[in-house]
Amino acid sequence: MQPSSTIMKPLINSIAGLLAASLATTAAATPTKIYIAGSNGDRVITNTAIAHVLGAGNFIFAGTSSDYTKANFGVFTGGSINGTPVTIKVSYIGAAGGIAALAGSLPVNFVPDGVSGGSVPDPTVTGNANDPEVPTFAFSTNFQATTPFSGTYQGHYYSTLDDFQVGIIPLKWVASKGYPGTNLSTQQAQLLWSVGYSPLSVFTGNPANSTVYVYATGRNTDSGQRYEALAEPGLGVNAYVKQYKPTITGQAAGVGGYIVGGTVTSQALWPIETFSGVSSQYLGNSGATTGSNLAPYLTAVLSSAAYKVASASATAGYYISYLTIGDANTIAIPNGAVELTYNGVQYSEQNVDNGQYTFWVYEHVLTTSNYTSGTSPGANLANALINQITNTDAAVGGILLSNAVVSRTGEGTLVTP
């Protein structure tokens, strides 16, 4: 009779082999998590490109909207990159915020694991579940040099990032519902964002409009759109501005299913807030966290309590702000907001391509140094998205680089052939 130890060894080895194989299979099937943070203005293009890279039917999306082109926060599960299963989380906190997080190794709140559907709470709101992680790479509508997040800033070090320009993101100046004007000039923009309001007569040239007031509203200090909106008319990216925050009642689902309309029952200069560790410092100098949050303001009607903030004798009031063409064309304008020309030039792709319309920024993919030369799933995804957007998907919410015969070296700089 064999000793029990002799009998047990093959059995133990067999069990160990099966367990090892099981663990290896489990490990191989565990998706690699990839975290992308950045500009809300890149949301439609980036999420569309992710879907194309993963392939239709190969993933499930859950987020703050079930439609990934509308979701500021969400997660793609079930797909793979070069045969490696991946889970891709996106958090569109702002162009400058994405740069700060990546360059400064600062965590961003992403949606937690295990979410489903299209009613996921915003993970950046205090008290909501979240998954705080440093981004794997970032998308931005800014050059890093435009932001303060380069080198040592306020005692924190921000590394220099590699920058890949992949498309052009046009912006529009948009006024609120019922606005009787048609154009915004450089001078008018400087006045409006410096003071916070101005009589409509300054914009229309009609003295009868002197008791109607136009108010500035806009984005917070994490926003790339804000940097361009301040740089383009010559205020400068670091200008302190006065933007108004509305309180709106009576909103309802409108065109596209967006919650819009309603009445501005009151407004005040935006409170002092801190984003990416940077305080807005002054009343009025902050703003909406995303373009999709800002756009509905321009579909509301100001009540007398709101428009009389500037003058007790005011008889009406409107907002003017700035949006990407995506948020302007899908949320604001279809629901009553008014598109404005800029210095007399109407937005069109042709006018951007040829240098006549200059209110635009580049879309950037930003990575840590030499990241895209690696072979990790994240590096492979970054390279795939750079190619997908540059060659195809920039056109979904912007303009292909290959279509433009002009360029610029930074936000608001000279547009040259």
Image: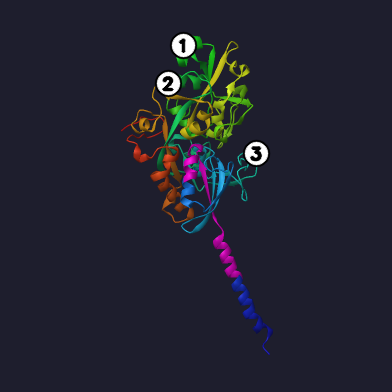
Q: Residue at x 54, y 28 (%)?
A: 335
Which corner quadrant holds the N terminus?
Answer: bottom right
In this rendering, the label closer to the viewer, 2 or 1? 1
Q: What SS does tag 2 mark?
A: loop
Give the amino acid at mark 1.
Answer: Asn
| Magenta stretch: dominant secondary structure | helix
In this rendering, the label closer to the viewer, 3 or 2? 2
Q: Where residue 199 sits: x, y (%)?
A: 51, 14
Q: Residue at x 48, y 9 (%)?
A: 207
* Label whose residue precedes the other's in the sequence (1 or 3): 3
The disc label shown at residue 206, or none: 1
* Label whose residue precedes the other's in the sequence (2 or 1): 2
On the image, numbered disc 2 is attached to which residue? 185
Span colored in magenta: 19-48
Q: Residue 36: within the magenta?
A: yes
Name the image quarter holding residue 169: top left
The disc label shown at residue 49, or none: none
Q: Where residue 389 sits: x, y (%)?
A: 42, 44
Give the amino acid at mark 3.
Answer: Thr
Which corner quadrant holds the C terminus?
Answer: top left
On the image, numbered disc 3 is attached to which residue? 126
**C-alpha span from label 1 to label 3:** 47 Å
